[in-house]
Amino acid sequence: MASKYYQEMQESFRNNNKSREFPAHTAKVHSVAWSCDGRRLASGSFDKTASVFILEKDRLVKENNYRGHGDSVDQLCWHPTNPDLFVTASGDKTIRIWDVRTTKCIATVNTKGENINICWSPDGQTIAVGNKDDVVTFIDAKTHRSRAEEQFKFEVNEISWSNDNDMFFLTNGNGCINVLSYPELKPIQSINAHPSNCICIKFDPTGKYFATGSADALVSLWNVEELVCVRCFSRLDWPVRTLSFSHDGKMLASASEDHFIDICEVETGEKLWEVQCDSPTFTVAWHPKRPLLAYACDDKEGKYDSNREAGTVKLFGLPNDS
């Protein structure tokens, strides 16, 4: 028997399953993220820029484009509680912190390698950035100086703090999740999560679960307290590139090179909805307050010039009559 929540959300998506796309960049979009208040969406692109949109009723209005990086912007994230600050990680060996009020870069921090992963600690005090050489650097968000640096002996994929700020998680190329204490960075546990490369990790807003996605096309759901796998979702056929929990922690979106985004109910693993795409998806992000999903795919422009990247950002969950 489907849960009340499941029935309510299916009904909601029956009336609100429109997707709309918004021009954002001149090349593919690697990363999208919402500010903590949900008013703004930021996107980072291969075109070396970040864009910020304001969410109006059922559309995104471009507010600004942020230039300065000398290479692709691979990942970005917002400050956990300040809706005006976001940080970008780039292959140009820097991270940049930006302020939407002044539209300026308020800090450029030089790092040792080409940066591919970034996250902001839940207490707002530290930014962790991972590079292609598997070094994770912890940067003080106020002084912009490096606090700690860890070289790992395995391929580091995504990184994240637990919601309580006292553990730091890394997904790795051997299919493991490495759990470190924070701020001591002492190993607590290494979990054999997947038989192949463990690619992405996300924590649910309630702090009960985290999810990982891997090259074996599986999404696993884990209990944070016990660090045990609760269930697996296996509707995708390709490596899972990106994950996002809804604001209430009850839905999980996952995407890959499959031409759809899977939306499931967390507690049962049941498929709630799927969002059709014309190409592989790079990034998904649920809005922090409502069932709106931002995403970006490997879209190409037009019928005739199929090599040009579209660089659009998309929004799913809009009213069908909008």
Image: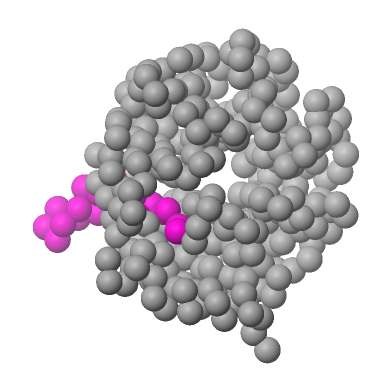
Q: Nearer the viewer, residue 262 or 288?
A: 288
Q: Which residues are magenta?
A: 292-314
Spot occupied by residue 210 in the image (x, y as percentages of width and height):
71, 53
Q: Residue at x 36, y 36 (%)?
A: 52
Q: Is residue 132 visible?
A: no
Q: Residue at x 80, y 26 (%)?
A: 183
Q: Residue at x 42, y 53 (%)?
A: 294
Spot occupied by residue 176 in the image (x, y as percentages of width and height):
75, 49
Lateral position of residue 17 relative to residue 151, left or right: left
Q: Is residue 185 visible?
A: yes
Q: Quadrant of residue 99?
A: top left
Spot occupied by residue 138 in the image (x, y as percentages of width and height):
67, 22
The secondary structure making up most of the magenta span is: loop
Verify whether residue 308 appears in magenta.
yes
Spot occupied by residue 258 in the image (x, y as percentages of width and height):
45, 66
Residue most extreme to the bottom? 1
* Marker count (numbered): 0
Residue 267 vertical placement versus 134 (above, below)? below
Q: Nearer the viewer, residue 214 or 44?
A: 44
